[in-house]
Image (cartoon, helix red, strand yellow):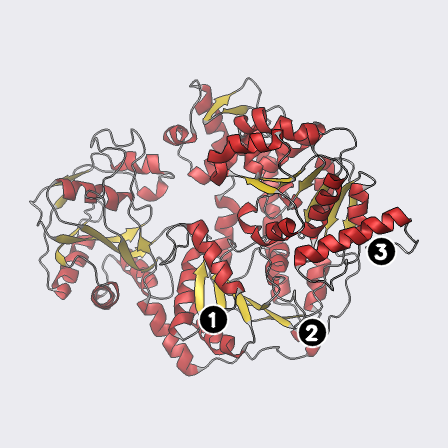
């Protein structure tokens, strides 16, 4: 790590440093703040020596202050605007506000600002922008490449690559669109300064970033969090973790974050904490609130409420990730284990950025390994996926990603990832023309399969390293983290973690009363809302001939599930019943109790029917009949399955899921005109419920409310 120069500065350079310090103080709103080690050195190297720098510093160190101050000084020298490439535009509100307090005119261009594109072009042409923030996905947009990027590159004063570890396919948050930057950098004017920043890069990632960005100087600081106390807990069941959280959080000072791996667990843990009188809220990519039905607005509102101190706890997935900065966070607790030391350091490091002591506790559950196995392999296209995509594109004169879903049985996320990966190769076997993907004559390099296998193996080794940290004893936990991150000078002992103290930082005993309540809570909370589908993929249901847009009077109402397939409560009991060929009466009684006491469907139910099956013709009808009896409602065998279908679980995207069901069902009994409970044992994509609701409403039924014992939907964050 380098530090402030001891050689006196020239008068001009000293005046510039003093001015830069004034900008820093204006940005952070603290007249007493001073530069951290190396902040001025990096600013000086960009502004006065026009260098290319890779800045590796812990989150909260002030990397955004470096590039905003450099941008301001360069503008005052008559240089052009600064271009910042960042995946975190929606999470950079605090940093942008600081930049504006420095007097910078800042604009952000991402998918949510498409309607203002022409305005941005005019602002750049008229020199009305000092800093332009751009999402990496813009570099795949031909309109941006043709009209705006040449204007920016012609006069760029500084290029900033934020979260630079995203460039590296060894990085924990690799984004293929970032790899287009190497080509962009070649188009910069000679001697243009460049700053790449990251808080989460080990030596392997640093070397990969250097290789892709060219000859860059690395400025690397110490990563230690001096006021953060670390602790790990042995693997516990979900109810044990809930009980520990409820017994511990009220005793912790200030506010904090509980991290989960999935949206479902974020909702579940938040509901439990609220039930115990703790002021908490879930936070994930799809979160909505009573005041905001748009997830972006909802997340912004929750961040503001949390920052103001009106929330004790945010229960969050990684949606509350890079870019979020709040120095008042006093604790970070992981309900489940992250997949790597890098990810853990980044998340636990959200605590302890202020002056007060902070706590980081790592919990884990028996489900963690399965979830991470799904994360490791589920999003990465296989070699067969890539071949199928190239063959499908080679057979047509271009196709949208939605059209490709009809040709290849690949999940949309994996399909999009594969297309982005292929399009950033040099030369590229596919290109994007507006929304249409086209095959080029370029042959595909078959080394992708080897690269994928290497990456999965790396992720597996990172997971094993995380397990070694979790079981570490003896040895300083902070030292282990810093050594794994290739910190140049990690201290042998932090003096604050449980191993250095020789005792737990927080007690590990579980309150029997809280354990009992947590068990009851787990049995009461439905795993998921079954959200109604509102649009059918084009040409996916030719036999039924339904319109693409499902009108409100034809779509299903929001439904519910009793549990999650294989969980330690009713979802696990449902899985056992499915295996045994019959559901226990207490499972069906729990379903009836949930429907009447917790869900309380509106409008009120008037009859019950079920999803038929030709493989198991009696399983679900018997469930539905018993459930109808407990609800004191008539059961009507209204639907017949008239042809065999493949299991929905092997259909990987919406187009294939719909085609598999097209023409498979018929209404065979006149439905009641009142609201109906449509029962199935399991739900995954929800397309079976969607299509049957359309058929029932078309036949004259009242509102259709889906219900399943369990959801098998893939876990995600």
In this picture, is 673 found above or below 623? Answer: above
**Residue placed under numbered mark 3 in the picture:** 4
**Which residue is denoted by mark 1 in the rendering?**
241
The residue pinned by badge 2 equals 496
Dot 2 and dot 1 residues touching (CB under 8 Å): no
The furthest residue to the left: 670
Q: Is residue 252 visible?
A: yes
Residue 215, horizontal then vertical, whole percent = 78, 36
Relative height, residue 354 to residue 694 (above, below) = below
Q: Residue at x 71, y 44 (%)?
A: 72
Single out the mark in the foreground, 3 or 1: 3
Nearest the eye: 431 or 365: 431
Few, some or many C-alpha atoms within 10 Å of disc 3 (few <14, some 14-19, many ≥20)? few
Q: Residue at x 76, y 37 (%)?
A: 193
* Callout 2: SS: loop
Q: Residue at x 79, y 42 (%)?
A: 47
Other-residue count near label 2 (Cα within 10 Å), few / some / many at <14 / 14–19 / ≥20: many
Choose top left, top right, bottom left or bottom right for residue 255. Answer: bottom right
From the viewer's side, name the closer residue of 637 and 584: 637
Tag 1 or tag 3, which sits nearer the N-term? 3
On screen, 570 above or below 529?
Answer: below
Quadrant for the N terminus, please. Answer: bottom right
Q: Residue furthest right?
A: 7
How far separated are the C-alphas under marks 3 and 1?
46 Å
Q: CA distance from mark 2 to mark 3?
A: 28 Å
Q: Position of residue 690 (x, y in %)?
A: 25, 44
Label 1 residue SS: helix
User: Mark 2–mark 3 contact, CB under 8 Å?
Assistant: no
Horizontal and vertical percent for residue 417?
51, 37
């Amino acid at each position: 790590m380098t530090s402030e120069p001891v050689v006196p500065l020239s008068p001009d350079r000293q005046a510039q440093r003093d001015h830069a310090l004034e900008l820093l103080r204006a940005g952070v709103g603290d007249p007493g703040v001073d530069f951290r080690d190396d902040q001025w050195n990096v600013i000086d190297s960009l502004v006065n020596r026009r260098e290319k720098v890779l800045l590796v510093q812990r989150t909260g160190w002030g990397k955004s202050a470096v590039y905003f101050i450099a941008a301001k000084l360069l503008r005052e020298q008559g240089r052009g605007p600064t271009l910042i490439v960042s995946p975190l535009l929606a999470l950079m509100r605090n940093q942008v506000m600081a930049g504006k307090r420095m007097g910078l005119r800042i604009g952000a261009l991402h998918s949510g600002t498409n309607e203002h594109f022409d305005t941005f072009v005019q602002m750049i042409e008229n020199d009305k922008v000092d800093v332009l923030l751009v999402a990496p996905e813009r570099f795949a947009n031909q309109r941006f490449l043709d009209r705006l990027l040449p204007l920016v590159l012609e006069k760029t004063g500084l290029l900033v690559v934020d979260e630079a570890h995203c460039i590296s396919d060894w990085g924990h948050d690799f984004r293929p669109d970032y790899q287009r930057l190497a080509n962009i950098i070649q188009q910069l004017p000679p001697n243009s300064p460049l700053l790449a920043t990251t808080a989460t890069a080990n030596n392997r990632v640093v070397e990969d970033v250097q290789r892709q960005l060219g000859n860059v100087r690395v400025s690397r600081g110490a990563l230690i969090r001096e006021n953060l106390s670390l602790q790990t807990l042995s693997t516990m069941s979900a109810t044990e973790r809930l009980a520990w959280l409820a017994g511990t959080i009220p005793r912790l000072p200030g506010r904090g974050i509980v991290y989960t791996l999935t949206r479902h667990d974020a909702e579940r843990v938040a509901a439990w904490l609220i039930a115990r009188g703790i002021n908490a809220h879930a936070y994930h990519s799809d979160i909505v609130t009573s005041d905001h039905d748009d997830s972006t607005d909802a997340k912004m509102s929750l961040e503001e409420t949390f920052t103001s101190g009106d929330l004790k706890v945010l229960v969050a997935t990684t949606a509350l990730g890079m870019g979020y900065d709040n120095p008042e966070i006093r604790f970070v607790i992981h309900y489940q284990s992250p997949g790597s030391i890098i990810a853990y350091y980044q998340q636990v490091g959200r605590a302890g950025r202020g002056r007060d002591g902070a706590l980081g506790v790592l919990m884990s559950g028996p489900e963690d390994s399965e979830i991470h196995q799904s994360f490791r392999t589920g999003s990465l296209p296989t070699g067969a996926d890539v071949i199928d995509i190239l063959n499908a594109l080679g057979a047509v004169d271009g196709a949208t990603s939605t059209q490709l879903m009809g040709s290849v049985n690949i999940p949309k996320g994996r399909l999009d990832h594969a297309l982005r990966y292929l399009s950033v190769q040099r030369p590229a076997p596919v290109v994007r023309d507006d929304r249409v993907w086209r095959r080029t004559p370029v042959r595909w390099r078959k080394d992708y399969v080897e690269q994928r296998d290497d990456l999965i193996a790396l992720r597996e080794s990172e997971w094993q390293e995380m397990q070694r940290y979790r079981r570490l004893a003896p040895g300083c936990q902070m030292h282990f983290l810093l050594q794994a991150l290739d910190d140049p000078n990690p201290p042998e002992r932090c003096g604050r973690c449980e191993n250095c103290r020789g005792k737990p930082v927080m007690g590990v005993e579980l309150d029997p009363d809280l354990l009992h309540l947590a068990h009851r809570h787990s049995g009461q909370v439905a795993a998921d809302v079954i959200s109604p589908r509102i649009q059918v993929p084009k040409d996916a249901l030719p036999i039924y001939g339904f319109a693409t847009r499902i009108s409100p009077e034809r779509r299903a109402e929001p439904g519910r599930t009793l549990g999650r397939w294989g969980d330690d409560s009713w979802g696990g009991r449902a899985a056992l019943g499915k295996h045994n060929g019959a559901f226990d009466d207490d499972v069906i009684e729990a379903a009836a109790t949930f429907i009447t006491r917790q869900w309380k469907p509106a409008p009120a139910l008037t009859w019950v029917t079920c999803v038929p099956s030709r493989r198991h013709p009696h399983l679900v009808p018997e469930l539905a009949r018993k459930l109808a009896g407990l609800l004191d409602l008539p059961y009507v065998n209204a639907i017949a399955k008239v042809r065999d279908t493949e299991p929905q679980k092997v259909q990987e995207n919406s187009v294939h899921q719909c085609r598999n069901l097209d023409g498979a069902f018929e209404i065979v009994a006149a439905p009641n005109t009142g609201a109906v409970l449509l029962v199935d044992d399991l739900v995954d994509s929800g397309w079976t419920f969607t299509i049957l609701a359309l058929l029932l409403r078309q036949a004259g039924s009242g509102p259709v409310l889906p219900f399943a014992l369990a959801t098998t939907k893939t876990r995600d964050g």
